[in-house]
Image (tube, grey):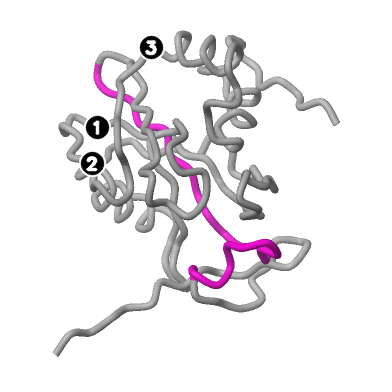
Amino acid sequence: MTVTLIEEVVLLDADDRPIGRAPKASVHGAATARHLAFSCHVFDDAGRLLVTRRALAKQAWPGVWTNSFCGHPAPAETLIHAIRRRGEFELGLELDDLEPVLPFFHYRAVDASGIVENELCPVYTARTRSTPEPHPNEVMEIAWVEPERLAAAIDGAPWAFSPWLVLQARLLPFLSGSSEPRVLAS
């Protein structure tokens, strides 16, 4: 007998308070409900940042380069547990030194197919000594890059990257070239 698990996300109100749950597959569409997610930027011991290219089978933003990985905590799951779980699943990584760097980051973006992301998406950094083993349904390519080289690439070709990475790069000191986060223009 095969058991199929339905991945659920935490739905949020306009003040980012949990108001329910829904199957993940049902909340990413043309009218995406606001929900809880996370992003993680993984560094190695040399200070390089792991970036990934999303698999072509991904529903939203297939084939674009992005941060190390993203995901959604399940209802009643802590963010730290969800980040560790997703890092292991997508990239086979064991993570150390998880730190929140943008705990209240949120964004709304629409991809070329009309899929909407509408997320409260706390951003974390982590370190690893593991060798990435990308899950082919999630990640089609990886690269370890110097943060300043990634920042230059994002500035030069923002259309080649996920919208959340472009927005995060403006705010994260290791990608903005500043010790202080940059303020997004309205």
Give the amino acid type for the residue marked by disc 1 in the picture.
Thr
Badge 1: few (under 14), some or many (20 or more) residues near its Cα, within 10 Å? some
Q: Check disc 3 and report its element: helix, strand or loop.
A: loop
Badge 2: few (under 14), some or many (20 or more) residues near its Cα, within 10 Å? many
Residue under pointer 2: 134
Where on the picture, by quarter, is residue 155? top right
Q: Which residues are magenta?
A: 24-45
State the mark number for residue 128: 1
The CA distance from mark 2 to mark 1 is 14 Å
Q: Position of residue 75 (x, y in %)?
A: 47, 73
Q: Nearer the viewer, mark 2 or mark 1?
A: 2
Residue 31 falls within the magenta-colored stretch: yes
Is 87 placed left or right of 31 in the picture? Answer: left
Q: Position of residue 153 (x, y in %)?
A: 51, 13
Give the amino acid type for the residue marked by disc 3 in the picture.
Glu
Count every numbered label the image shows and give the total. Answer: 3
Q: Check disc 1 and report its element: helix, strand or loop.
A: loop
The CA distance from mark 3 to mark 2 is 20 Å
Q: Position of residue 140 (x, y in %)?
A: 30, 38
Is 93 placed left or right of 41 in the picture? Answer: left
Residue 86 falls within the magenta-colored stretch: no
- In this view, 98 is above or below 11: above
User: Which residue appears farthest toward the right when viewing the image?
Assistant: 186
The CA distance from mark 1 to mark 3 is 15 Å
Residue at left offset 58%, top offset 68%: 27
State the mark number for residue 146: 3
User: Which residue appears farthest toward the front when viewing the image?
Assistant: 113
Give the amino acid type for the residue marked by disc 2 in the picture.
Pro
